[in-house]
Image (cartoon, helix red, strand yellow):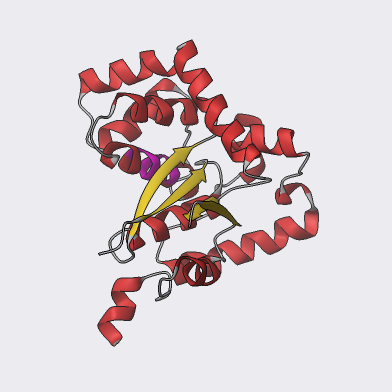
Amino acid sequence: MTSKKVVELFYDVVSPYSWLGFEVMCRYRQVWNIELKLRPAFLGGIMQGSGNKPPGLVPNKFLYMTKDLSRLAEYFGVPLQAPSDPFEAMFKKGSLSAMRFVAAVQEREKGGDEQVERVSRELWRRIWSEDKDITEPASLSEAAMKAGLSDSEIKEVLALSTSKEIKDKLKSATQDALDCGAFGFPLLVCHVHGKPEMFFGSDRFELMAHCIGEKWLGPQPDKSAAKL
């Protein structure tokens, strides 16, 4: 078997399109010959650093996005549902404390990224499925508990998430994404023949597959394989 191609996924749980990209890549790590590296980062820093504006701030884009996400949720098989006040959830509350929490989970997890994957998913579920907060320590603790972390692990992660070490770790991941040319999330960076190839958004998987020499079987590869 040829050596696995490294694919980095930069994401933030405040971004619904990142949830779609995340679930697809987690499914395809079992299908494609890839090594998936989860790179939690801060979308607010990307927007500021790249000079981009969120699509939600353009009225027509916001209306389109609402409809688009409901269609995509069904197509991707992800229980995505907009919060009652998306503007407050995304722009007033934001995700800085949540992403520092995810970065702290990653920092203390050894030998894999199961906890990072599960905690990220539970945070997305809270904001983009259950219309719940992801900023308060109690909210982060509840998400981590559902993801299978013990009380002592949660306390440790909460304390770590406010440390300079973790703040710097998240800043560094965000800067790495900007250095790759990021202007939004999800951002996928495929390392092919020693050269990084960047793909933005949750609608570039077919092209990405072509570039890394893999086959795209749709957003739910298990279902596609069952039909063959």
Q: Residue furthest front?
A: 193
Magenta extent = 119-124
- Residue 187 placed where, x, y %? 56, 50
Q: Which residue is at 62% across, 65% downward?
A: 67
User: From what the image shows, is residue 150 above or below residue 132?
Assistant: above
User: From what the image shows, is residue 43 above or below residue 75?
Assistant: above
Q: Is residue 61 left or right of residue 141?
A: right
Q: Is residue 102 left or right of residue 71?
A: left
Residue 120, picture quadrant? top left
User: From what the image shows, is residue 42 above or below residue 203?
Assistant: above
Q: Which residue is at 32% across, 62% downward?
A: 33
- Residue 105 placed where, x, y %? 34, 28
Q: Main SS type for the magenta part?
A: helix
Q: Can residue 82 be seen in the rendering of this structure?
A: no
Q: Is residue 102 left or right of residue 10?
A: left
Q: Which residue is at 63% across, 60% downward?
A: 66
User: From what the image shows, is residue 9 above or below residue 203?
Assistant: above
Q: Is residue 89 left or right of residue 125?
A: right
Query: Along the line of sight, which residue is nearer the eye, 129 or 189?
Result: 189
The quadrant the N terminus occupies is bottom left
The quadrant the C terminus occupies is bottom left
Reply yes or no: does residue 44 show up in magenta: no
Residue 109, picture quadrant? top left
Residue 214, picture quadrant? bottom left
- Residue 40 placed where, x, y %? 47, 37
Q: Which residue is at 33% across, 79% downward?
A: 224
Query: Along the line of sight, which residue is nearer the eye, 64 or 226?
Result: 226
Query: Along the line of sight, which residue is nearer the eye, 3 or 113?
Result: 3
Query: Along the line of sight, which residue is nearer the eye, 118 or 182?
Result: 182
- Residue 32 placed where, x, y %? 34, 65
Q: Residue furthest bottom?
A: 228
